[in-house]
Image (cartoon, helix red, strand yellow):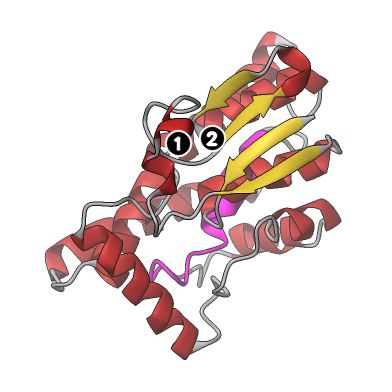
């Protein structure tokens, strides 16, 4: 049994999607970010960085793992699924996983802060992070022209990147003119385990921004956390 400590963020949903894809039994422990539960002593014992997600593997002497990318690798290696075991195949998955961890996640995260949450609009910052997110999307689009998935077969690299890319409208980033990226987004969204994973836990906002009233409420709650120094998301 896996205990999953999480919230409805892209980084949190990476892990719930993977657990659903792997059909691993898990218990959902929802962390209330707005109340700062991720900074409480009990959670800091699992993740000293005080950010979600984190897991505890009850079958491995209550072994705790934090950082979403590290959790994905741990689960893949534990089950022998969603990542090849040969050196080159594993490296390809790790390359695209690091692409998300070092690029897609941080750039879209900062785009969210300056485009949605920050109390002052700073055009140069918004343009910077939206522009870099768009550049990274184009890298993916070019690659996906000749590849069904990012690193051979469907893998944790796809899960990690998709959990962020699917929220592109919230970041103010368009996928227009990127047909291969859009094909990939739609194909992964159609997977039953993915659909279940993004409901564990459900977000109070459709991240495709279909409800403007909910979008404003969501942004206001996040803005308060930015102003008080609390992080909305779960870390990379």
Given residues 138 and 78, the one toward you in this image is 78
Q: Nearer the viewer, mark 2 or mark 1?
A: 2
Q: Residue at x 71, y 47 (%)?
A: 17
Residue 205 horizontal side relative to residue 93, left or right: left
**Residue 75 location in percent, x, y?**
71, 26
Residues shaded magenta: 156-174
Q: Is residue 102 visible?
A: yes
Residue 158 horizontal side relative to residue 214, left or right: right
Q: Residue at x 40, y 39 (%)?
A: 40
Query: Is residue 166 within the magenta segment?
Result: yes
**Residue 198 location in percent, x, y?**
68, 58
Q: Residue at x 63, y 24 (%)?
A: 73
Residue hosting label 2:
68
Query: Is residue 94 within the magenta segment?
Result: no
Q: Earlier in the sequence, mark 2 or mark 1?
A: 2
Q: CA distance from mark 2 to mark 1?
A: 9 Å
Q: Which mark is residue 101?
A: 1
**Residue 54 location in percent, x, y?**
55, 34
Residue 225 horizontal side relative to residue 17, left or right: left
Q: Is residue 147 visible?
A: no
């Amino acid at each position: 049994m896996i205990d999953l400590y999480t919230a409805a963020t892209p980084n949190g949903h990476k892990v719930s999607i993977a657990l659903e894809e792997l059909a691993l039994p898990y218990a959902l422990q929802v962390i209330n970010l707005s109340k700062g539960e991720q900074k409480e002593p009990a959670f800091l014992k699992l993740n000293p960085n005080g950010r979600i997600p984190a897991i505890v593997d009850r079958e491995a002497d209550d072994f705790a793992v934090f950082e979403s990318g590290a959790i994905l690798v741990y689960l893949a290696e534990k089950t022998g699924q969603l990542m090849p075991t040969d050196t080159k195949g594993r490296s390809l998955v790790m390359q695209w996983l690091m692409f998300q961890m070092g690029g897609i996640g941080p750039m879209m995260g900062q785009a969210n802060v300056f485009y949605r949450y920050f109390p002052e609009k700073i055009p140069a910052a918004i343009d910077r992070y939206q522009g870099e997110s768009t550049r990274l999307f184009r890298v993916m689009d070019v690659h996906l022209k000749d590849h069904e998935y990012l690193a051979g077969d469907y893998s944790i690299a796809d899960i990690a990147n998709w959990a962020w890319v699917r929220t592109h409208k919230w970041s103010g980033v368009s996928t227009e003119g990127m047909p291969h990226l859009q094909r990939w987004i739609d194909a992964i969204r159609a997977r039953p385990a993915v659909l279940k994973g993004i409901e564990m836990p459900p977000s109070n906002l459709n991240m495709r921004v279909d409800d403007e009233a909910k979008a404003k409420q969501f942004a206001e709650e996040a803005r308060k956390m930015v102003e008080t120094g609390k992080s909305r998301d779960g870390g990379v």
